[in-house]
Amino acid sequence: MKTSKSSRRRTRVAGFTLIEILVVIVVIAILATLVAPNVFQHVGTAKSTTAKSQIEMISSALDAYRLDTGAYPNTAQGLQALQELPTVDTPTNWRGPYLRKAVPLDPWGRPYVFVSPGEVNTRGFDLLSYGADGKLGGEGEDADVVSWN
């Protein structure tokens, strides 16, 4: 029996070589180094935008509270007055809760600062988040997000 040349040839098993896999990994790594900074740059912007939206939502609830009670809650009553009837200087005509859920923390995990009557808005309230650094002032991600701008 004679074997044919084609049957003597080794058949190649389908798959990728080590070089091909390394080239793909290098290409993915290069793409990741180019794309990642752009993605993470927008995380801070998203948090600031979220804080602005939450401040607007809380401000609307404070306005509804004022319409019912005749005044904004004072600093001692705090934002908790939007969820439950205050025990300090209990207002008449409280028809809350004014928010469906508890007052949220800011996007950096800290409570919003509420001062009433406000230092900036003396006839109303000041509501703000200190930003990423948790300190008054700052720029970029560290900038304060305020209700009066």
Image (cartoon, grey):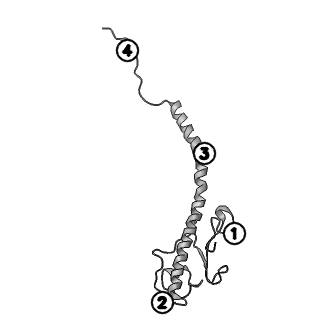
On screen, residue 47 above or below 116: above
Left or right: 122 in relation to 12: right
Q: For the residues marked 4 and 1, what is the alpha-carbon distance in whole angstroms?
A: 79 Å
Q: Which is nearer the N-term, disc 2 or disc 4?
A: 4
Left or right: 114 in relation to 64: right
Left or right: 76 in relation to 138: left
Residue 132, how many percent across, how many down?
Answer: 63, 64
Q: Nearer the viewer, mark 3 or mark 4?
A: 3
- Which disc, if any, is residue 93? 2
Classify residue 120 by image quadrant. Answer: bottom right
Q: Which is nearer the N-term, disc 4 or disc 1?
A: 4
Q: Which residue is mark 1?
A: 137
Q: For the residues marked 3 and 4, what is the alpha-carbon distance in whole angstroms?
A: 48 Å
The residue under the point 51% across, 83% down is 65
Q: Which residue is mark 3?
A: 34
| Farthest left residue in view | 1
Q: Secondary structure at mark 1?
A: loop
Classify residue 9 by image quadrant. Answer: top left
Q: Which residue is mark 4?
A: 6
Q: Secondary structure at mark 3?
A: helix
Q: Nearer the viewer, mark 2 or mark 1?
A: 2
Amino acid at circle 4: Ser
Marks 3 and 1: in contact by CB < 8 Å? no
